[in-house]
Amino acid sequence: MDQSTDQPVISVAGLAKSFDAVNAVGPIDFSIEKGTIVGLLGGNGAGKTTTIAMILGLVLPTAGAIRVLGHDMLRDRHRVLHRINFESPYVDMPMRLTVRQNLTVFAGLYGVGDARGRVAELAESLDLTDFLDRPSGKLSAGQKTRVSLAKALINRPELLLLDEPTASLDPDTADWIRGNLDRYRRDRGATILLASHNMPEVERLCDDVIMMKGGRIVDRGAPKALISRYGRSNLEDVFLDVARGRGHAASLEEASA
Ligand SMILES: Nc1ncnc2c1ncn2[C@@H]1O[C@H](COP(=O)(O)OP(=O)(O)OP(=O)(O)O)[C@@H](O)[C@H]1O
């Protein structure tokens, strides 16, 4: 039975990860509602990638619970994986296979019915047609990012986890990708969690922002609400306050000490 109705799409409680002496994440608690785009913000080493990797089941938590689409990810991830997908600049596709071959393999892995049709549809919507039959190892960084996004959308996921989805893209292509993500969310009621260092991107795209520092969640809110709470004019300045522990961020740190 599907237990996902009306439950948060992601819910984590007491989630923590240590790598030997390094406390990379946690403990953290948060949940994400269906149909929202949530940004995970934080400086280098704040724990964003580790958090996403734990939600995906790629990294085992040291402690805590993760529920995705109503299922316990640590026990039942096989019941959820076909309904989610991810994109990360750190994951390369087999270099010698063409873009079309790679996407077709992923379509097969996700059990997509009409693989040929789905690849053609994505090639059209993400503008991959010019290099669809080129080896994946011979693409520019921006072209690779678009192919990774096509791979992430291949199974029409209900939940999309993105690690820096517009890294290496020129401003025009990045803007166009953001438009695509927003449309995908609207058309399918999908939920998106994305880590990003691009503040204008987060301001434009995200309904809600989770701010991380040193593996912990230090604040959360809609971009506009955060900007007003910190008395700033944009999210970049909020980010700097959090990273440097000043202004409103300093009072939060004092309160939690
Ligand atoms: N496999 C690992 N072994 C040891 N330490 C790790 C490992 N993966 C991550 N870490 C450490 O955990 C912390 C969090 O790293 P993580 O990659 O999650 O941060 P991030 O917020 O994604 O950073 P960035 O913005 O630089 O990508 C860092 O201190 C990092 O060095």
Image (cartoon, rainbow, N blue to C red):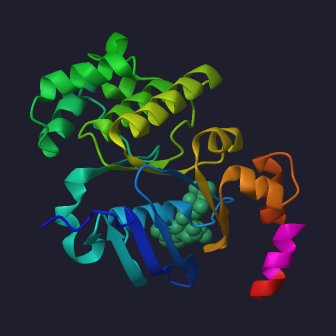
Asked whether 228 or 45 is in front, the reply is 228
Residue 256 vs residue 123: left or right?
right
Question: Was residue 248 drawn as part of the magenta stretch in this picture?
Answer: yes
Name above or below for residue 217 compared with residue 159. Answer: below
For this view, does 197 lie left or right of residue 23? Answer: right
Q: Is residue 29 something one can see in this rendering?
A: yes
Q: Residue at x 86, y 46 (%)?
A: 233
Q: Position of residue 210 (x, y in %)?
A: 61, 62
Residue drawn at point x = 50 percent, y = 40 percent: 165
Q: Residue at x 63, y 66 (%)?
A: 46
> Within the image, what quadrant is residue 149 found in?
top left
Q: Residue furthest top?
A: 130
Membership of 244 in magenta stretch: no
Q: Residue 225 lies in what quarter of the image?
A: bottom right
* Quadrant of image for the C terminus: bottom right
**Dominant SS type (magenta):** helix
Q: Quadrant of ligand 1?
A: bottom right
Image quarter for residue 48? bottom right
Magenta extent: 247-253
On the image, the x and y values in percent for residue 211 come to 66, 63
Q: Where does residue 255 sit, x and y in percent of width and height? A: 80, 85
Q: 189 left or right of 182?
A: left
Q: Position of residue 119 (x, y in %)?
A: 22, 25
- For the point 50% across and 81% down, the residue is 18
Work out which quarter of the rendered image holds the N terminus and state it.
bottom left
- Residue 245 appears in the rendering: no
